[in-house]
Image (cartoon, rainbow, N blue to C red):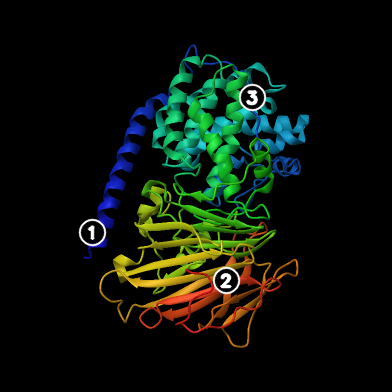
């Protein structure tokens, strides 16, 4: 057994032991309390209903009224049955149903029928909660349901009778009480932070909860300090986590003000750090770069969140704590993943995309990663997380990270964490003699298995019309094995790009939607145009192409390439391997 395998097994054993202990403790402390009857002195009313920043669609209300529930890419027609009695077609569907975030669509319709429908569905859930699916009892789903019920209380409680009001409050109180004892049992990362946010909502918005405000604030700020990094990124390294968290944190900040309670400084600080990072990950067209679980950008929600950003300044260029770098000149943007995988407990959605990059020119994205679709993620997740789904190098057709593969373990952990990957990721920013912005990076993700260090350098010209790149494969110790020295450099193109290979097979012509023409040159290396898939489209997965350079590291350990705008500079001249590149990489 290799040293890498022993280390992986050790890390996995420790991770599983901690997880099982936390789950057992949560069950012991939460079991009896969840079943206690409504206690005297429990809150009997809501004081405030926070604003829900998520976009609502009034047309969805008629579908729900007709018994048609569409969540997570699955549609269930309930006929005369309750949706809470129907077997869920997928875990995503069940999580969405029991999270009740869809109540906002009924509120948007604003009619007596939709209010009555909302009350009926909430009442059904209260009656059937003992038979609810396992997904409904997860702490993060309970947290989402608490936030949804509190935020949409005007919809559910307006025109209700006293009996339903008390029934609603009794159920809400039980759920809050249970979450207080099981929040720490939530999966680490966003699910656990969401649980703390929900408890803060409940303490501020429900009567007779003042005694819990201090404790809830302490638990929330502890998680914010741990999960929101100094540069504003999230511990999971998923750019989408920022959107999901801010859409709940911004209304929470307003609730503090409405209750005349000073928001905790760590809450204010976290929001202030996260806002600039939203702009860091955006391309010129407003969409987020596709790293570590990011899918389609919800432009409506993002625009709403950015409306709260008073600074609206230029995004930072060096997000060292989050593990990302950004180069931007005259509307040309390069965003690069320059960090190791996140800690194992928060790596269920992380990708093996170290040193991958995305390139855009003004409103046009050129080089992308595959990303993840908005729905049906489980069917694509294994493919999307592989290194080959990213614009970087693969070695011997394997990923730079290893994921947990056992089915039973994956079900228990609600995902497949990363158990090994790059540990040493070096990053250096500098400015070349001619003013070009240069990134020099490397990672050791292939060192343990193949004894190879992957080095990549990128240089963006002073006018933003040229990106030079160089990939080098150095032996870690000794020589690279002749049997395991095959590499592939992949550059996935956005579906809007029309690519055609040049006759000499060493370059490609790229036509952008605005008729601007860019070229790709691999100089003395041969390129291939192969099929790819862009998963993060707003209308679902779309076919696209990728530029691929194949080689053997023992024969050719260095590959140089260039993207350039043809209107600004002619097709780069082919050069021999002994010549110096135009930009010193």
- Seen from the viewer's position, the closer of residues 267 and 194 is 267
Q: Disc 2 vs disc 1: Cβ atoms closer than 8 Å?
A: no
Quadrant of res 362: bottom right
Q: Which residue is mark 1?
A: 6
Q: Disc 2 vs disc 3: Cβ atoms closer than 8 Å?
A: no
The answer to whether 524 appears left or right of 33 in the picture is right
Q: Position of residue 318 (x, y in %)?
A: 50, 50
**Quadrant of the image containing the N terminus:** bottom left
* Residue 130 to residue 449: above or below: above
SS assignment at label 3:
loop
The answer to whether 213 appears left or right of 101 in the picture is left
Label 2 Cα crowd, 10 Å radius (few <14 / some 14-19 / many 20+): many
Task: Return the disc, 2 or 3, that comes first in the chain's sequence.
Answer: 3
How many marks are shown on the rendered structure?
Answer: 3
Q: Which residue is mark 2?
A: 532
Q: Position of residue 109 (x, y in %)?
A: 76, 36
Quadrant of res 18: top left
Question: CA–CA distance between discs 2 and 3?
Answer: 46 Å
Q: Position of residue 384 (x, y in %)?
A: 51, 62
Q: Residue at x 33, y 30 (%)?
A: 28
Q: Which residue is mark 3?
A: 49
């Amino acid at each position: 057994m290799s040293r890498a395998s022993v280390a992986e097994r050790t890390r996995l054993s420790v991770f599983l032991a901690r997880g099982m202990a936390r789950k057992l403790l949560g069950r012991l402390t939460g079991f009896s309390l969840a079943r206690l009857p409504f206690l005297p002195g429990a809150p009997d009313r809501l004081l405030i209903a926070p604003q829900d920043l998520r976009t609502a669609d009034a047309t969805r209300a008629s579908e729900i009224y007709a018994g048609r529930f569409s969540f997570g890419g699955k549609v269930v027609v309930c006929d005369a049955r309750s949706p809470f009695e129907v077997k869920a077609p997928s875990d995503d569907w069940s999580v969405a149903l029991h999270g009740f975030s869809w109540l906002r669509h009924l509120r948007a319709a604003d009619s007596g029928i939709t209010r009555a429908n909302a009350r009926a569905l909430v009442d059904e859930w209260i009656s059937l909660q003992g038979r609810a699916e396992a997904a409904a009892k997860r702490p993060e789903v309970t947290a989402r349901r608490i936030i949804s019920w509190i935020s949409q209380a005007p919809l559910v409680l307006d025109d209700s009778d006293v009996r339903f009001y008390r029934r609603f409050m009794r159920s809400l109180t039980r759920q809050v009480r249970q979450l207080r004892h099981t929040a720490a049992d939530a999966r680490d990362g966003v699910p656990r932070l969401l649980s703390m946010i929900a408890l803060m909502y409940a303490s501020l918005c429900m009567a007779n909860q003042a005694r819990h405000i201090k404790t809830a604030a302490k638990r929330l700020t502890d998680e914010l300090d741990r999960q929101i990094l100094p540069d504003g990124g999230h511990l999971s390294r998923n750019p989408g986590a920022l959107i999901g968290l801010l859409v709940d944190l911004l209304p929470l900040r307003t609730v503090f003000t409405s209750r005349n309670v000073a928001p905790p400084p760590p809450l204010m600080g976290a929001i202030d750090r996260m806002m600039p990072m939203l702009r860091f990950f955006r391309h010129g067209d407003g969409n987020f770069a596709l790293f570590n679980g990011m899918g389609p950008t919800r432009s409506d929600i993002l625009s709403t969140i950015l409306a709260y950003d008073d600074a609206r300044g230029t995004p930072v260029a060096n997000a060292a704590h989050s593990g990302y770098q950004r180069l931007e000149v005259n509307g040309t943007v390069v965003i690069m993943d320059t960090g190791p995988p996140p800690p194992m407990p928060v790596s269920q959605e992380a990708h093996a995309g170290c040193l991958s990059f995305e390139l855009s020119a003004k409103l046009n994205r050129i080089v992308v990663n595959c990303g993840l679709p908005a729905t049906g993620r489980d069917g694509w997740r294994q493919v999307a997380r592989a290194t080959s789904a990213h614009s970087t190098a693969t070695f011997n057709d394997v990923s730079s990270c290893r994921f947990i593969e056992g089915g039973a373990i994956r079900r228990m952990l609600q995902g497949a964490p990363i158990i090994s990957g790059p540990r040493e990721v070096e990053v250096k920013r500098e400015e070349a003699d001619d003013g070009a912005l240069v990134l020099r990076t490397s990672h050791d993700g292939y060192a343990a298995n193949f004894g190879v260090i992957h080095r990549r350098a990128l240089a963006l010209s002073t006018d933003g019309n040229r990106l030079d790149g160089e990939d080098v494969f150095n032996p870690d110790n000794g020589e690279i094995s002749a049997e395991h020295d095959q590499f592939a450099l992949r550059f996935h193109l956005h579906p809007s790009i029309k690519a055609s290979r040049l006759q000499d097979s060493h370059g490609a012509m790229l036509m952008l939607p605005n008729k601007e023409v860019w070229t790709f040159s691999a100089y003395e290396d041969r390129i291939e145009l192969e099929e790819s898939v862009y998963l993060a489209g707003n209308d679902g997965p779309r076919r696209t192409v990728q530029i691929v350079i194949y080689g053997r590291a023992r024969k050719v350990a260095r590959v140089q390439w260039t993207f350039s705008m043809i209107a600004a500079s002619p097709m780069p001249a082919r050069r021999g391997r002994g010549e110096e590149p135009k930009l010193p990489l």
